[in-house]
Image (spheres, rainbow, N blue to C red):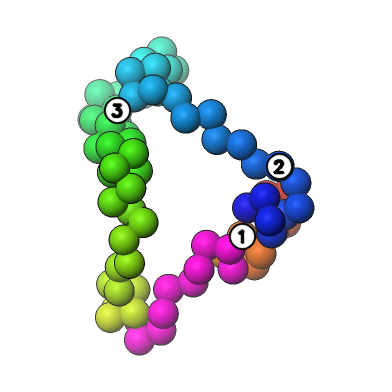
Amino acid sequence: MTDVLRRPIRYTRPSEQSYLAALAEQGAPQDYIDVQKMIYRVVRLNISAFPNHAVQKLTGRPATRFDQFVDDYRDVWS
């Protein structure tokens, strides 16, 4: 996003415990917190970085790269 938008984008990398505690403090329901815990772990283990061809199988077209997605919707990020 930094390269496409030409402005710094920073990710603070909260710990799992502090992230989930913040969700609870904001009143998130437990089932939502449980899903976020799973997503947090998938991202931390870098599992989401593996290629996934499901979009192409379903649509017949390759998935949009993230940098292209950011560029296509750059007005949303401002």
Residue type at mark 1? Answer: Val
Q: Nearer the viewer, mark 2 or mark 1?
A: 2
Callouts 2 and 1 close, C-beta under 8 Å: no
Q: CA distance from mark 2 to mark 1?
A: 14 Å
Residue at (36% x, 56% y) in the render: 49
Q: How far across and down, in percent of the image, does residue 58 sit? A: 29, 79
Residue type at mark 3? Answer: Ile
Q: How far across and down, in percent of the image, does residue 3 sit? A: 68, 56
Residue type at mark 2? Answer: Pro
Q: Quadrant of residue 44?
A: top left
* Magenta-colored stretch includes residue 65: yes
Q: Which region shows up in magenta?
A: 59-68
Residue 70 disc label? 1
* Viewer can see residue 11: yes
**Magenta part, dominant SS:** loop
The residue where tag 2 is placed is: 8
The residue where tag 3 is placed is: 33
Residue 1 disc label? none
Residue at (55% x, 35% y) in the render: 11
* Viewer can see residue 76: no
Query: Front-most of 76 and 63?
Result: 63
Helix, strand, or loop for circle 3?
helix
Q: CA distance from mark 3 to mark 2?
A: 29 Å
Q: Nearer the viewer, mark 3 or mark 2?
A: 2
| Label 3 vs 2, first from the N-terminus | 2
| Label 1 vs 3, first from the N-terminus | 3
Helix, strand, or loop for circle 1?
helix
